[in-house]
Structure formats: structure tokens, C-alpha cells
């Protein structure tokens, strides 16, 4: 029975196309606050943007079980894609982040070309505060890259491009027992865009 419940939750999160009605003149933040998962809170500002290949989408990142005293809340992201003129949006799963005993923060969401086609990808910079006594301490920066989608056949889940994401991740900003003081190189959108140009994108 427990396994069935886990599978069902996975289907609800990633595999079932869910649509939501946005009220007339409702702001993006009010829309997201109204439909957010029970017990959740927003991790960062709601983003409504036309910059993902000229489609006006709404992007939200939620902290699940936000009232829990344990600081390793799961952070889940969705992009809401308009599918009809009357204000209906389809929810598309972006990704989830959860790290041991720390909270993942969404630092930046932006769009840039990161593969061989002309369409832009979605890039998400996250950070976590890490500390393991005598080994390392500081802020770790990670960049995740998600492939562009066909808005005519909207998927239920974005495809993560791990190879280029690994190349764009900033690393640790702080102290490492093996290296001493270390500084993360790619911590914001401007630095990542500059690195993409160096890589030929």
C-alpha cells in the first residue's frame, strides 16, 4: 500500500497533465498563491515572463512542508504554460531539490542558448549553505539547465541537460580542507552567460 502511495504521488507531481484556471486580472503571484500545494510556501519571487521563446509563462518554486522544523525541505518547481485564450494554464514539472539538513535556495532563473539548436533553454542557479567540520564550509552554487519545449505539445516534465549543467555549476564559495580558501566562479546569471559564450553558445 505504501509503495502505491509513493507511485501515486510521483504521477501527480510529474506524469499527469494538470490545468488551472487563472482569474481575470489576477496577478501571477495571486494565481500561484491560490493554487500552491497544501502546506507549501514560495521559495523565491514568482516569475512571469515572455522570454522563454516568446511564450508568456509563469514560473514558481515551492518549499514543501514549509512548517516543518527540519531544515531540509524539498523545493519543487513548476512552469505554468497558457494553453487556452480563456486563462487556462498547464502545469509542467521542472525539478525538485533536497539536500541533507540544509535548505536549497533558488538564486536565479533565466534563459539562454545552451545547446546546438536556436531555441533558448531555462537555466536555474541554486545555492545551499554547507558545513562539515574540518572538511569544508561555505555556499555551494549549482546550475541546472532545462531544454526548451514544444509549446504545441506541452510536456508534463522538463528535460534536464546534465552535461552542460555540470560545466556551468559554480562550486563552493568558502573553505575546503583540501584547498584552503576557495571561491565559486559562476554564482549569477551574468557569469554563467559569459561562460556560455566561452563554450561557443
Image (tube, grey):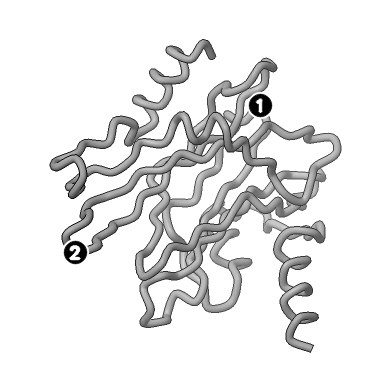
Q: Residue at x 49, y 77 (%)?
A: 65
Q: Quadrant of residue 133?
A: bottom left
Q: Does 9 sit above or below residue 87?
A: below
**Does 193 sit left or right of 5 as displayed?**
left
Residue 16, position in %: x, y?
81, 61
Q: To which residue does mark 1 refer?
A: 54
- Quadrant where the image shows the C terminus: top right
103 or 179, which is in the foreground?
Answer: 179
19 or 88, which is in the foreground?
Answer: 19
Q: Quadrant of residue 57?
A: top right
Residue 87, position in %: x, y?
74, 50
Disc 1 to disc 2, how far (Cα)?
47 Å
List the single residue furthest toward the front.
178
102 or 30, which is in the foreground?
Answer: 102
- Element type at mark 1: loop
Q: Quadrant of residue 67?
A: bottom left
Q: Residue at x 69, y 41 (%)?
A: 159
Q: Does 29 sit above or below residue 183?
A: below
List the single residue furthest toward the bottom.
1
Q: Residues within 10 Å of mark 2 (few under 14, many from 20)?
A: few
N-term mark: 1 or 2: 1
- Element type at mark 2: loop
Residue 45's disc is none
Q: Residue at x 78, y 74 (%)?
A: 8
Residue 76, position in %: x, y?
56, 60
Q: How many marks?
A: 2
Q: To which residue does mark 2 refer?
A: 133
List the single residue furthest toward the right.
153
Amino acid at each position: 500500500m505504501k509503495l502505491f502511495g509513493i507511485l501515486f504521488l510521483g504521477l501527480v507531481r510529474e506524469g499527469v497533465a494538470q490545468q488551472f484556471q487563472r482569474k481575470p486580472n489576477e496577478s501571477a503571484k495571486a494565481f500561484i498563491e491560490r493554487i500552491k500545494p497544501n502546506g507549501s510556501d514560495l521559495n523565491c519571487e514568482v516569475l512571469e515572463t515572455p522570454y522563454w521563446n516568446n511564450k508568456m509563462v509563469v514560473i514558481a518554486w515551492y518549499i514543501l512542508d514549509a512548517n516543518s522544523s527540519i531544515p531540509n525541505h524539498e523545493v519543487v518547481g513548476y512552469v505554468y504554460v497558457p494553453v487556452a485564450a480563456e486563462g487556462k494554464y498547464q502545469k509542467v514539472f521542472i525539478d525538485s531539490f533536497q539536500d541533507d539538513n540544509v535548505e536549497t535556495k533558488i538564486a536565479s532563473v533565466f534563459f539562454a542558448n545552451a545547446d546546438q539548436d536556436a531555441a533558448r533553454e531555462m537555466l536555474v542557479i541554486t545555492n545551499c549553505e554547507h558545513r562539515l567540520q574540518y572538511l569544508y564550509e561555505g555556499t555551494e552554487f549549482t546550475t541546472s539547465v532545462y531544454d526548451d519545449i514544444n509549446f504545441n505539445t506541452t510536456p508534463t516534465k522538463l528535460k534536464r541537460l546534465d552535461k552542460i549543467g555540470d560545466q556551468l555549476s559554480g562550486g563552493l564559495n568558502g573553505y575546503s580542507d583540501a584547498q584552503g580558501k576557495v571561491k565559486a566562479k559562476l554564482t549569477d546569471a551574468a557569469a554563467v552567460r559569459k561562460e556560455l559564450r566561452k563554450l561557443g553558445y
